[in-house]
Image: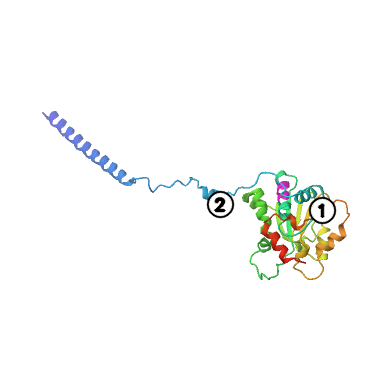
Amino acid sequence: MAKRSSAKRQAKYQGENYTHNSRHRDSSRSKSKRRQPDSNSNIVDINSHSNQLETAYYPHHKKTPLEARTSSQQKYINAIQTNCLTFGIGPAGTGKSYCAGALAAEALESGRIERIILTRPAVEAGENLGFLPGEVEDKFAVYIDPFRDILNERLGRGVVDYCLRHGRIVGAPLAYMRGKTFNNNTFVILDEAQNTTPVQMKMFLTRIGDDCKVVINGDIRQSDIRGDNGLEDAVQRVQGLPGVHIHKFERTDIVRSGIVRHLLDRYELD
């Protein structure tokens, strides 16, 4: 009799315990369900790609070799490739800077050179910009922006940013060239050379080392300085020297746009 009563109590206890555990599990399940969102409408895939962002942050760059748009450009390109020092003289829009920058980019990408140096005299075109904030590199960045656009197009923005940070591409005012030597691993471009003085041009030309590549561009008729023009003076002095080529673009060689040619015709009637 005692055994039967004990068995009944044990069965009753187990039943109550089962009911309690079952209620606890049901409660946990309901809470878990409440925690889960009703839909996936608020879930965002951070790895998804946007064509607009792809274009903005990963700009396409030209992988094809540089192709001349005129016969004059082709002669200019050939001159740069075969000579140590090349002068590109002529009006705006003829492709002087673009061809030089594109050839420098190709040489850097192929490993034929280790560094590109971009320089120009820090002269404003008829106006004073005043104080520019930042370090020297930041101040001079305004002057080499056109070349940076060319390099971005030929190499890609990420490559150009990397090369600028690590000294593979250097932009510096002409005054900072004193004391430097351009070696055979360097491609140097002096742009807007019509704004140099004869003393500045002499200082720059005497930086040239063996087997380096130097291009000097400018339009003698658009000088923004008073006094003698360093570019015009240099062209007269270096004619006939070995390894030096002087290429002259004409107004008919303008490729930027047809209107530029017509505008120059109106501004330079003489």
Question: How far from the left and from the top, in percent, is residue 121?
Answer: 74, 63
Question: How far from the left and from the top, in percent, is residue 184?
Answer: 80, 49
Residue in front for this viewpoint, 44 or 194: 194
Q: Decide whether the magenta segment is chiefly helix, strand or loop.
A: helix
Name the element at disc 1: strand
Residue in front for this viewpoint, 20 or 209: 209
Amino acid carrying mark 1 in the image: Leu
Count residues near mark 1 (Cα–Cα under 10 Å), then give few for <14, some for 14-19, many for 20+: many
Magenta stretch holds residue 107? yes
The mark nearer the N terminus, 2 or 1, is: 2
Amino acid carrying mark 2 in the image: Ala
Name the element at disc 2: helix
Indicate left or right for 21 with 198 as reference: left
Question: How far from the left and from the top, in percent, is residue 254?
Answer: 72, 56
Residue with the mark numbered 2: 56
Q: Residue at x 67, y 64 (%)?
A: 139
Q: Residue at x 52, y 47 (%)?
A: 51
Indicate left or right for 188 with 259 as reference: right
Magenta stretch holds residue 82? no
Q: Residue furthest left?
A: 1
Residue in front for this viewpoint, 148 or 217: 217
Residue with the mark numbered 1: 85
Magenta residues?
102-108
